[in-house]
Amino acid sequence: MKKIGILTSGGDAPGMNAAIRAVVRKSIYNGLEAYGIYQGYSGLINGNIKQLELGSVGDIIHRGGTMLRSARCEEFKTKEGQQKGIEQLKKFGIDALVVIGGDGSFMGAKALTEQGFPCIGVPATIDNDISGTQFTIGFDTALNTVLNAIDRIRDTASSHERTFIIEVMGRDAGDIALWSGLAGGAETILVPEEKYDMENIAERLHSGQKRGKKHSIIIVAEGVMSATEFAEELKKSINIETRVSVLGHIQRGGTPTGFDRVLASRLGARAVELLMEGKGGRTVGIEKDQIVDNDILSVLGQPRKFSSDMYDLSQVLSI
Ligand code: ATP
């Protein structure tokens, strides 16, 4: 193997740049050439490919987003689209590919591997919703961004003695809501993995008020419902006035945390090692601080285990 291609695909996540840098530098360190594929699978189909040198990935480790840019590409879901991609890879003499993204992007990596082109998936999404890894690249940064917002909202909630409902991202997963809610001292956390009970929520809010609590924070994961819908539900069922804050895309940007940069560096480097060992069709991840790899088929479509223990703890600590 002489040439490795790298692309980022799907939603961007802070730390993707650190992963790109690790793949490029680890490749060059081992005497390989690295090729950046711009705009995900759409750039692959169109041959938007350039060789990357050591300096091409300088000054990016601390930047959010992705220097290779990202895209969603419907055409790549078809056999014809995938064939066009393989033709481009052959044209550039690229032997193997590292795909940095979420599980949709891994589907593309799986399809290429099945057609004889070895790919390794590096999990990067703020949602932390990929199995085979305890953490995805970008989750820790998003968590800290949300936490920062919760702390600020808490100040104003407290001054005005208000109940705030904060909607956070996560798609169908509740990790951003759970971790930020626990770390931010939220009174109530709504996640798609656990049913909520309106009576219980009302009881918590009322008992808090009785004890003289000046504010309440409710975190709603977008996978449950919108914060506005939940505010209406609260008003209808227990006649509580609330304020709504939807954090939106600020959660996807920003300087990656130290944790995300280190994770991205370790996962990116391991992806290159696997390709050098002649392996494809695998994903890398972290479990108990060890870098692991898994068959891509065992990861795709598998829901990540939700931490019910942490959810229970959040209930205990927010009485
Ligand atoms: P995130 O969850 O953070 O948004 P993702 O990687 O899951 O990231 P998707 O939009 O689901 O994001 O997928 C990204 C791209 O991967 C798609 O636009 C498409 O090009 C490719 N892809 C998705 N599903 C498939 C599939 N079944 N076969 C081939 N390619 C696919």
Image: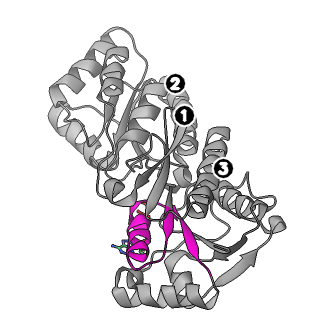
Q: CA distance from mark 3 to mark 1?
A: 13 Å
Q: Amino acid at mark 2?
A: Ser
Could you say whether the residue bearing mark 1 is in a helix, strand or loop?
loop
Q: Which range is magenta?
A: 94-120
Q: Residues within 10 Å of mark 2 (few under 14, many from 20)?
A: few
Q: Amino acid at mark 1?
A: Asp
For label 3, the residue is 265
For label 1, the residue is 289
Visible in this render: residue 15?
no
* Picture quadrant of residue 205: top left
Q: Assess whether residue 211 is covered by the magenta stretch.
A: no
Report the side of 309 relative to 150 (left or right): left
Q: Assess whether residue 95 is covered by the magenta stretch.
A: yes
Comparing 196 with 257, the one in front is: 257
Q: Quadrant of ligand 1?
A: bottom left
Residue at left offset 72%, top offset 69%: 32
For label 2, the residue is 159
Could you say whether the residue bearing mark 2 is in a helix, strand or loop?
helix
Could you say whether the residue bearing mark 3 is in a helix, strand or loop?
helix
Task: Looking at this view, name the residue that lies furthest to the right.
Answer: 55
Residue at left offset 40%, top offset 85%: 75
Image marks 3 and 2: residues in contact by CB distance under 8 Å: no
